[in-house]
Amino acid sequence: MIPSLIRMARSRTYAEAINLLNTCQSNAATIEAIRKSGGRMNDYAIVEMNDYLRRIGYVPDDLNKLNVVHITGTKGKGSTSAFTERLLRTHMTGRIADVGLYTSPHLCAVRERIRINGEPLSEEDFARYFFEVWERLEGNTKTIYPHTPQFPIYFRLLTLLAFHTFISLGVSATVLEVGIGGTYDSTNIVPKPVITGITSLGLDHVAVLGNTIQDIARNKGGIYKAGVPALSVKQDQEEATRVLAECAEEARTSSYEVVPMIPETALGLRGAHQRINASLAVALARGFLRAQGKEGMDDALPRSFVAPLAGTKWPGRCQRVEQGKTTWLLDGAHTTESLTSCGEWAWGEGNKPGVLIFNCSGGRAGQMLLTALLEAGARTSSSELVELGKRFEAVIFCTNVTYTDGHFSSDLTSHAIDPNDLSQLATQNQLRDAWLELVPGYDPKQAHVVASIQHAVDLVRGMEGEHEVLVAGSLHLVGGVMEVASLQGSLGMV
């Protein structure tokens, strides 16, 4: 390790923790390969992760003390985690640190990924636990394989940090969201969770990643464990349901259930699709609380669950934030299915977006994503797609770079952006072309391509009158807008 990084490790500030963490990011090519593999690139992933755990002083069985609810899926896993966390937190009292939540990605600050009772770790706590993990890895350099890096990649390191934090604080329950896939994910080293659940499996992941629905289902089903209840929502594809049932049988789970939809009830998260996520969360929480000896968990929707479901918050997902003359409609939807749900929400509930800020990953089909958004909006508002598109006073396609000078907020630094794509604004120009094709007759002068999120926010702020601004296509984009537009006060879940 170079001396400057050693000095940073000993100074223990949050900013320096983030700088060190960012040195563990993979580049764009590596991340794209991992994404396309569904997280299967490294056959040694779980063995290496267990070894990293050993090097910071733990064995896998220590993770069972966290009382884990393990959740995966291709859409809705973050919302399901948020509902589940709120339900458990409401029903578990009497300790200082009751419920831990680990999710990804973050919006504005890395510490959002690790929450205690709904609140992100403070900068001081994040730095303290981060350097405890970092210095243990620094002091114990013997790796299980010669090719294993001394320090794990970004997500693995954050997962180790989450485990260390939750063990150190003695949480009584942990909601653990999978990062990518399931079988080979860094979170999948907990030997015996209390209960496991799988959200909806999206068809567009099949199209984009080149995997079959059977591949995706089997990978997700890798979180099922022997002797542990296994749950899933009803999948759109019968083949996916069949494969998940096979995974449960092969893993020798204690039970396997396709959860029924809960009765209609108020939900704190907007969008019709959230009822599916809430149904899985209810089943996960009921199963967890039964295992803890809690009574009154037999109803399809226990009465004590109604208020927590209505009070659940999950920033950056179908979130409306009013700020002066601007109303921000924020949704990190980034698949055709989630953008369909986004469109239903964005043109429902009295919303009337007149400005769009949009970005997506370079590897995704921009026209398909924009079509899904506009088609859903047109159906919801009883309009024609072209008519709806022409109502936008401006559409802005920007990169995920935070500021106009080309740098990122340190918490939002990303090595995952292809520098060649970025320098040419290739993705953004492709999105603009797709928009103009989808909405014939739209004034090209109103379709902007800009190099940063700050450029986009400045354009909005320079417009006269009041505006509803829809921000969608990327959670990183939503987080950047929240950072630049100073909307961080809406990040809490409590």
Image: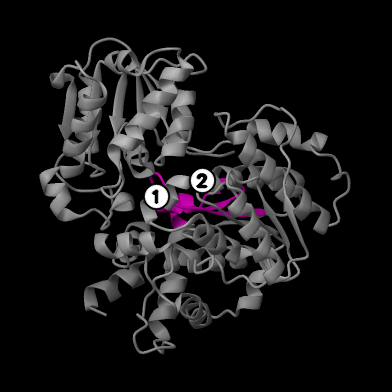
Checking the image for residue 75, the label placed there is 2
Residue 133 point in image, percent of width and height: 46, 72
**Nearer to the camera, 381 or 18:** 381
The answer to whether residue 433 is above or below residue 102 is: above
Is residue 321 among the parts visible in the rendering?
no
Residue 246 point in image, percent of width and height: 66, 64
Q: For residue 109: magenta?
A: yes
Checking the image for residue 401, the label placed there is none
Q: For residue 240: magenta?
A: no
* Local SS, label 1: helix
Q: Residue at x 41, y 37 (%)?
A: 488
The boundaries of the magenta stretch are 98-124
Q: Quadrant of residue 167?
A: bottom right
Residue 225 point in image, percent of width and height: 68, 68
Checking the image for residue 207, the label placed there is 1
Q: Quadrant of residue 169?
A: bottom right
Q: Residue at x 49, y 13 (%)?
A: 350
In space, the residues marked 2 and 1 are separated at their CA atoms by 15 Å
The answer to whether residue 39 is above or below residue 339 is: below
Residue 437 point in image, percent of width and height: 21, 26
**Nearer to the camera, 412 or 469:** 469
Tell me the crowding category of disc 1: few under 14, some 14 to 19, or many 20 or more residues within 10 angstroms, Cα based.
Answer: few
Is residue 425 among the parts visible in the rendering?
yes
**Nearer to the camera, 135 or 334:** 334
